[in-house]
Image (cartoon, rainbow, N blue to C red):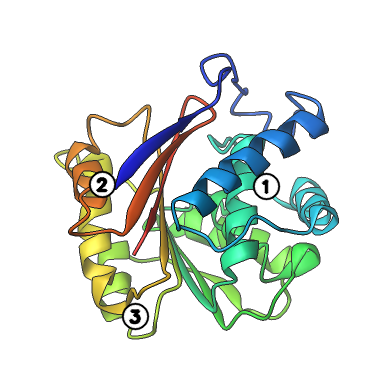
Amino acid sequence: MARQYISSDAHLYRMQMDKPHERLEPEEKEIELVDDVLRALVEDGIIPHRNYDLAKFLAHRKAVAENFEIPWTAITPRQQRLIYAINAIVQPKCMLAAGIFCGNTFISNAGAGVGPGKCYEADDLVGIEIVPFEAERAERNVRKIDPTGIAHIVAADAVDIARDYSHPIDVLYLDADGDEARGKGIYLDILEAAKPWLHSGSVVMAHNSVNCAERLRTYLAHVRDPKNMKASVNVVIDGEGLEVSAV
């Protein structure tokens, strides 16, 4: 089962990619919109409830703004809050995030399990970045707010890491790019590699479900097929989009 959640202003909500911390709307509006998305995800059985700690999220956002080197990002403030909230609700013991660039996308997921935004006990939160010098920068960023090492970065191919992970994966986040032929289509390869470790209750998030919809056509058809996923919602709250699916 698949459906869309589309905010009325998604086509107008834009950020400058080199200004990731710029406020684009009143905080109250951002909270209300994300809460409405979470309600839709609860209705479709993707997450169990919509409660997360607003103060802990703000502590997370502040720590990232003060400590991370982010040359640019496509993760809007709305998406940052939504991704954090989903992780805070699901509370993954193990999470894989593929294609994390400088670590901002990764920490939006992992920040519910480590650092100032921590709200539960995680075991292993893994960010995967195939470009070595970007992985190194991401690791430096993450270490500034997580001294434990529970959240960490590996420089590798996400398909290989997902295939060989051998632990239950509670959240899988996809934002990777493949070779010229596959591009964002590599999402499906990563998902297929991770399938042995996904379980009932696992949540899969795929960024760029709107602006890269054509390259993601096969992936989106797969997760929207009820034979493959319990439910899937295309969350359209900005120009990028986020497909959220439940195993």
Q: Earlier in the sequence, mark 3 or mark 2?
A: 3
Q: Is residue 160 visible?
A: no
Whether 36 is drawn above or below 186: the answer is above
Label placed on residue 165: 3
Q: Nearer the viewer, mark 1 or mark 3?
A: 3
Mark 1 residue crowding within 10 angstroms, few (<14) / some (14–19) / many (20+): some
Q: Residue at x 74, y 70 (%)?
A: 119
Image x and y of residue 230, in percent: 31, 59
Residue extending farthest to the top is: 12
In percent of width and height, residue 62 lies at: 82, 49
Measured from the top left, where is residue 96 in percent x and y?
44, 67
Which quarter of the image is occupied by the C terminus? bottom left
For label 1, the residue is 69
Residue 147 shows up from this direction: yes
Give the structural element (helix, strand or loop) at label 2: loop
Q: Is residue 233 left or right of residue 153?
A: left
Q: For marks 1 and 3, give the CA distance.
A: 28 Å
